[in-house]
Amino acid sequence: MNSRKKILLAGYLNYINAQNINCVDIAKSLNQNLFDVTLLRLGYNQNDLIDNEFKFYRVSKLFMKISYNISLLRGILSQHIIYIPKHQMTYSLTLKIIKFFGIKIFTTIEGNIIHKSQKNMIDNFSGEYNFVQYFKLFDKVFPITNFIKNNNEIDFNLNNIVLRLGVSEIFFQKKTSFKIKNIIFIGNLNESKGILELLDFVDYFPNLMFHIIGEGELKKDILIANKKNIRVHGKKNRNELPQLLRHMDINISFSKSEGFSKTILEAAASGVPSIIYNLFGSDEYIVNKKNGFLASDVNDFKIILKKLISGEYNLKQISYNARLLADKNKWSKVINEWENIIYEITN
């Protein structure tokens, strides 16, 4: 008799974005003797994020949202529990049907629900009422940071247990150079990620090379700007990104619209500290000037980078501390928290 817990992680195993990567990393990290994992596959694209053979439900690119929800409903037939990270793809009716058949469902809150004047998750639901009604359909909703847990003022079933997201072992690279030459940006190339600010920022540092990783609506603007110290790499797969990070010195993000980005831990694992805004609980992970840098405005970014170039900050030590930060949050150390939650919800 198979006593393993059957779980559907509703992310795509063959398409790169943060939610999908998290689902794939969870699938790889869960104890296979205790958990029977199923993922989703979008279309017939073979660009898998994993080598392991996992079962999957296929989601059609034609009428993708409908197909995604049908795949969730398939879980009624064979799953004990479903983790659903894609809220804009998931119909409330789908959640109600799944719950009617006694299948447990849980999710995580990763985005901004605190500062409503900025881009936030509530706006995605056209208001707080719809947001609350949607998330109350889940058996459990977990914050991924203490900042989200401690600062939330909305009554929507948010659990008081923080369910951390980890970083994959593939990003732990040995760093040998500690001179400021190469700066990396990783993310969607749109306005909310601070791309326009970055385009202005690079002019202050003509002797540095800025490497931009990602795709998006502003890629054309970047190429038209034709800055000599910008190299646009496009999207990198799971094997290519760690190799590129080995040659980077600082990770930079001007985003003011998201929670603690997964790329900060990925860069840290490669010994690449980050300069980011001190928002959304960033100081929960980043100790300013010790394992990374927290800025209050664009001028702070300039000051920090100039001090790194001059050697006023010890990049070698900060790089080492960044790796320690990532080590505390690698999936092999975080996954027990997920396994315990899955067992708690299903028992």
Image (cartoon, rainbow, N blue to C red):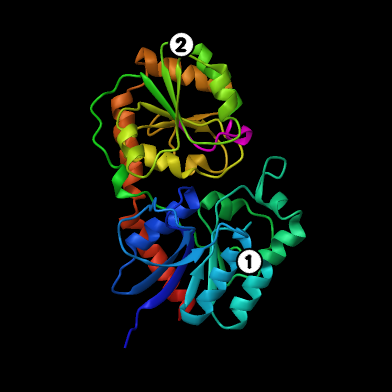
Which residue appears at 43% of the width and 39% of the height?
264
x, y percentage for residue 62?
Answer: 59, 58
Q: Residue pushed farthest bottom?
A: 1
Amino acid found under the numbered disc labelled 2: Pro
17 shown above or below 70? above
Look at the image and give the residue range highlighted in magenta: 185-194
Q: Nearer the viewer, mark 2 or mark 1?
A: 2
Residue 103 shows in this picture: yes
Place of residue 17 in the rendered image (x, y in percent of width and height, measured from the top left): 48, 48
- Residue 90 position within the rendered picture, expressed as x and y whole percent measured from the top left: 62, 63
Circle 1 residue: 157
Camera-nearest residue between 207 and 234: 234
Upstream in sequence: badge 2 or badge 1: 1
Question: Does the magenta portion include 186?
Answer: yes
Specify the amino acid type for callout 1: Asn
230 relative to 309 in the view: left or right: right
Position of 327 with respect to 45 (left or right) is left
Q: Tell me the quarter of the image containing the N terminus.
A: bottom left
* 283 or 196, nearer to the observer: 196
Residue found 35% across the figure and 26% down from its top: 249
Q: Quadrant of the C terminus?
A: bottom left
Q: Would you identify the image quadrant in which residue 152 lies?
A: bottom right
Horizontal side, residue 308 vs residue 332: left or right: right
Let me know if residue 176 is in the magenta part.
Answer: no
